[in-house]
Amino acid sequence: MNYSPNPLLNRRSLLKLAALAGGSAGLATLLSSRLSYSADQNQAIAKNIEAIEEFLRQIRPVDSQNLQWTEYSFETVTVDRRGQIIDRRQGSARSWREPLGNGSELEMVAIPGGSFRRGSKNEERGDHTSSEKPENSLTTAAFFLSKYPITQAQWRAIAQLPKINLELNPAPSFFQGDNLPVERVSWYEAIEFCQRLSRATGKDYRLASESRWEYACRAGTTTPFYCGETLTSERANYFAVYDPYAEEPASAYLARTTPVGSFAPNNFGLYDMHGNVGEWCADSWHRNYEGTPPLDGSAWLDRDTRLQPRYRSARLVRGGSWGDEARHLRSANRTFCLPDQHHSVLGLRVMADSTG
Ligand SMILES: [Ca+2]
């Protein structure tokens, strides 16, 4: 990283800073903070939820034959429980680029199809509410996922396009910078982004399903993190000064978002899956994997009637953020926010289906 970290902050100054950023620290405390920046337009779009769910169900695969492919190389690392590097590997991945019109472009990575175990084992620390149980086996077809969370330059390009259902603020983020991830966007606004992007490009873009998100994050690994048994601030942007996950020392805390791609990627060549901003997924929140979750990589869209009515509209958020402790960044970790919530810890990444 070519960034100078802030001096270590204690919990008190963190909370003060996070309050300035629009709420309490991290996704984990977001719900208890009862913060909701509902705008009138969000209320209007909430009435349109059937149309949105239809949009999420209907997805035409992008023809992988008609794309301009490039291959890129990267180094991935594996760490032990102390956060020490025990393995370095050269990886490569294939991607294609979608021009967005203002000089920015969207890079989409080919994610191979495959099977995996979703969820966490009892011996994996951090699943305090058993939301990651029971583990289940899934198989997904190949798909495309954006290499990075959506940046502010990308957001601005799409926000300038004509409205479909909802106005988009071209500069909604608390931390400003073209190459920083966009944040303070609601789930409804993330959907509007996908709708405008799809209309402008003629390709169907969606938010990832949580199952594909986890599959893509794990990239073949079964450890708590794609880089192994724990994290340090050299591996991801998160609240590394508090509550170590394993035996790693406390490390630097930046208290802000970082330019996308600042840390080593996973085996699929995806960056910032752990930390930086949490990422909206398409699915409705279900409090665990009991019931009938789809096992083919598609989004679980029906409502969880076991939840209090207030939370039935909640949507999945994955990957943890700059304000979360390591356990909230685990590949299996699940959390949720209400679909009209905006926060400086919340962004998005986009997915497209593939013909193969
Ligand atoms: Ca992330």
Image: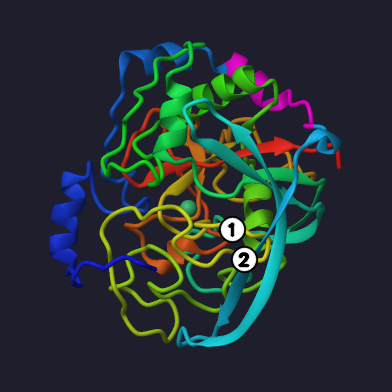
Q: How is the image coloured?
A: rainbow
Q: Which of marks 2 and 1 is nearer the N terminus?
A: 2
Asked if the residue under mark 1 is in contact with the one under mark 2, i.e. CB atoms within 8 Å, the reply is: yes
Residue found 54% across the figure and 79% down from its top:
229
Label the magenta part by its dominant secondary structure. Answer: helix
* Range of magenta residues: 50-62
Residue 30: horizontal and vertical position, in percent? 32, 46
Q: In this view, does 116 lie to the left or right of 342?
A: right
120, above or below 16, in the image: below
Q: In which quarter of the image is the C terminus?
A: top right
Q: Which of 305 and 317 is in front in this view?
A: 317
SS at circle 1: loop
Query: For the residue carrying disc 2, how many other residues have a C-alpha within 10 Å: few (<14), some (14-19), or many (20+)?
Result: many
- Does the magenta-highlighted stretch encompass residue 314? no
- Does the magenta-highlighted stretch encompass residue 52? yes
Residue type beneath disc 1: Glu
Residue type beneath disc 2: Ser
Task: Report the Cα–Cα distance between label 2 and label 1.
Answer: 6 Å
Residue 78: horizontal and vertical position, in percent? 58, 79
Judge whether residue 292 can be spotted in this image: no
**To which residue does mark 1 refer?**
132
Residue found 34% across the figure and 34% down from its top:
342
Residue 148: horizontal and vertical position, in percent? 53, 49
Q: Is residue 226 left or right of residue 177?
A: right
Report if the beta carbon of the residue with label 1 is closer than 8 angstroms to ligand 1.
Answer: no
Q: Which of 44 and 78 is in front in this view?
A: 78
> Hey, which quadrant is residue 341 in on the image?
top left
Q: In which quarter of the image is the N terminus?
A: bottom left
**To which residue does mark 2 refer?**
120
Hey, which residue is sitting farthest front in the picture? 103
Judge whether residue 117 can be spotted in this image: yes
